[in-house]
């Protein structure tokens, strides 16, 4: 092992050729984001999950890098729910091809189940919630009318 | 203009005062006909589908009577023991199978949001006859009607809502409906585990004065609205004993002389039978107002077809 490769081994994260980097995830929420993206034992992609990374703006943050993967609209909306401050970077050929902030639409349809177990949407399907308050984020179910904060949604 | 024509009746949460007043005015007229047992042909040729997925006596019968008195027909579905819902048919399939044959759906369902969900999936008007622990909007209308009949107004009242305020759909509907009137004070009394949901308190505080009481203090109330506390909601029998309350003639001595006592019924032990002879007890009158108020709702939604 040359000194150079040895040094490389100690790099926190390598650059990725193509894939996504989800930056500025609120500290501690990266595991929820990972669950949203289905990053379990069946996952084949190379994933880097960084927790408690120093950040100039928020103190500490989490970051997830996934190689060879892009995100669906539904995944983006779910990430916006648990990590409203997240920035998404689409990487192609080692460079940032696209960069945007996670944004939750005013109406979230068929994205997350209503946390109320007896809500009709958990029986019949197609849950629909709308943003009731932005900060702190609160969503209200269009059917059962109950109001939930972000941490009450499970994935 | 009739704001109710073709509309769904799902939740009082966003109702406007004027819309409620228009139903109450129509209910006044219906009440005269109802008390004289006069039938009309207003809704001749129209069919109301009753989808009751949960037991109901009063609501179901009063909707049926209302439809009959207006000349319409009722087709009942949804007895969980005999209908296809017992075979696991979804609400969606039931609504879709019937929508071409009926003019209005009346739905009671154990799951919150069922009526709203049905309404989102059909163009036929849907009336919520109780969805889980969420809402029972036509009960709120008949409650308002009863209050107006007795107090001759709906503004400037102090209304005490007591019992299970967390799961009680009638109190949710009534509290939101009252919040659109002027000078209302809502007093809430419940066991600590069955308090009004916090988002509802926040909503209501935007419109009215809200007081959460530590004890069943009837002294300031113009309207006392008692509801039952279901035993199954409180697992600890001792806690249930402490949480439950009973209004008898002794307790009524603390109420104002011109207060009225209401209850959506059925009662368990909240109101002693001896209170029935107190002239302030209005729950039986309240119950009988179900028919004219539902006549008003049905006739306004379905319009004059004669």
Image (spheres, coloured by chain):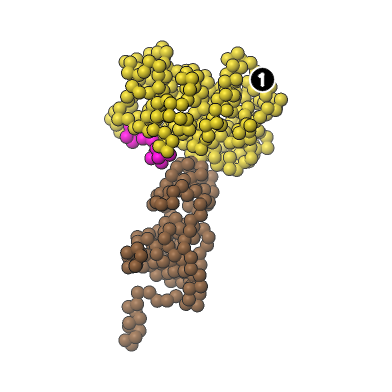
Chain colours: A brown, B yellow
Mark 1, chain letter? B
State the residue in front, A65 or B196: B196
As drawn, which residue projects farthest toward the right?
Answer: B306
User: Which residue lies at the image location 52% right of the left edge and 27% below the top edge?
Assistant: B141
Residue B74 shows up from this direction = no
User: Which residue lies at the image location 44% right of the left edge and 51% below the top edge?
Assistant: A134
Q: Quadrant of residue B158?
A: top left
Residue, disc 1? B40
Relative placement, left or right, of B102 versus B137 is: right
- From the top left corner, tell me how far across and down residue B34 is, in percent: 59, 17
- From the top left corner, tell me how far across and down residue A30 is, in percent: 38, 62
User: Which residue lies at the image location 58% right of the left edge and 43% below the top edge?
Assistant: B120
Main SS class of the magenta portion in the image? helix
Q: Is residue B194 magenta?
A: yes
Q: Is residue B143 magenta?
A: no
State the residue in front, B60 or B27: B27
**Above or below: residue B178 compared with residue A58:** above
Q: Quadrant of residue B84?
A: top right
- From the top left corner, tell me how far across and down residue B32 is, in percent: 59, 16
- From the top left corner, tell me how far across and down residue B112 is, in percent: 48, 39
Highlighted range, magenta: B191-203
Question: Is disc 1 placed on a helix, strand or loop?
Answer: loop
Say which quadrant the N terminus of chain B sits in: top right
As drawn, which residue projects farthest toward the top?
Answer: B277
User: Which residue lies at the image location 32% right of the left edge and 34% below the top edge?
Assistant: B192
Mark 1 crowd level (few <14, some 14–19, many ≥20, 10 Å Cα): some
State the residue in front, B77 or B187: B187
Relative placement, left or right, of B253 versus A109 is: left
Residue A129 shows up from this direction = yes
């Amino acid at each position: 092992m040359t000194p150079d490769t040895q040094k490389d081994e100690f790099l926190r994260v390598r650059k990725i050729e193509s894939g996504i980097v989800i930056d500025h995830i609120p500290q501690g929420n990266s595991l929820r984001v990972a669950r949203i993206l289905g990053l379990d034992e069946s996952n084949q992609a190379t994933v880097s999950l960084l927790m408690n990374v120093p950040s100039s703006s928020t103190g500490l943050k989490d970051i997830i890098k996934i190689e060879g993967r892009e995100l669906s609209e539904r995944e983006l909306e779910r990430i916006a729910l648990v990590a409203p401050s997240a920035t998404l970077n689409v990487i192609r050929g080692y460079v940032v091809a696209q960069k945007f902030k996670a944004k939750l639409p005013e109406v979230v349809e068929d994205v997350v189940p209503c946390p109320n177990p007896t809500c009709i949407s958990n029986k019949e399907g197609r849950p629909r919630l709308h943003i009731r308050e932005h900060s702190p984020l609160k969503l209200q179910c269009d059917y059962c009318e109950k109001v939930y904060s972000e941490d009450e949604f499970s994935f | 203009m009739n704001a109710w024509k073709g509309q769904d009746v799902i939740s009082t949460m966003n109702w406007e005062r004027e819309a409620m007043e228009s139903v109450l005015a129509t209910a006044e007229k219906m009440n005269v006909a109802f008390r004289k047992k006069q039938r009309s042909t207003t809704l001749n040729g129209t069919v109301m589908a009753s989808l009751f997925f949960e037991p109901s006596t009063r609501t179901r019968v009063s909707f049926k009577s209302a439809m009959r008195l207006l000349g319409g027909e009722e087709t009942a579905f949804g007895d969980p023991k005999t209908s296809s819902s017992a075979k696991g048919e979804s609400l969606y399939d039931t609504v879709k199978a019937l929508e071409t044959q009926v003019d209005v759906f009346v739905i009671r369902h154990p799951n919150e949001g069922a009526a709203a969900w049905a309404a989102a999936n059909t163009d036929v008007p849907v009336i919520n006859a109780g969805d889980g622990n969420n809402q029972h909007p036509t009960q709120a209308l008949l409650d308002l009607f009863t209050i107006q009949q007795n107090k001759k107004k709906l503004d400037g009242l102090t209304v005490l809502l007591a019992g299970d305020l967390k799961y009680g759909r009638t109190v949710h509907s009534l509290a939101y409906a009252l919040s659109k009137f002027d000078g209302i004070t809502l007093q809430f009394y419940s066991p600590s585990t069955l308090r009004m949901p916090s988002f509802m308190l926040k909503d209501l505080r935007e419109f009215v004065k809200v007081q959460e009481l530590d004890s069943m203090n009837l002294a300031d109330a113009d309207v006392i609205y008692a509801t039952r506390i279901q035993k199954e909601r409180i697992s600890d029998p001792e806690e249930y004993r402490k949480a439950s309350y009973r209004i008898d003639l002794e307790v009524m001595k603390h109420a104002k002389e011109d207060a009225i006592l209401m209850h959506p019924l059925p009662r368990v032990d909240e109101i002693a039978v001896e209170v029935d002879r107190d002239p302030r007890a209005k729950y039986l009158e309240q119950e009988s107002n179900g028919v004219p108020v539902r006549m008003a709702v049905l006739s306004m939604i379905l319009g004059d077809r004669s």
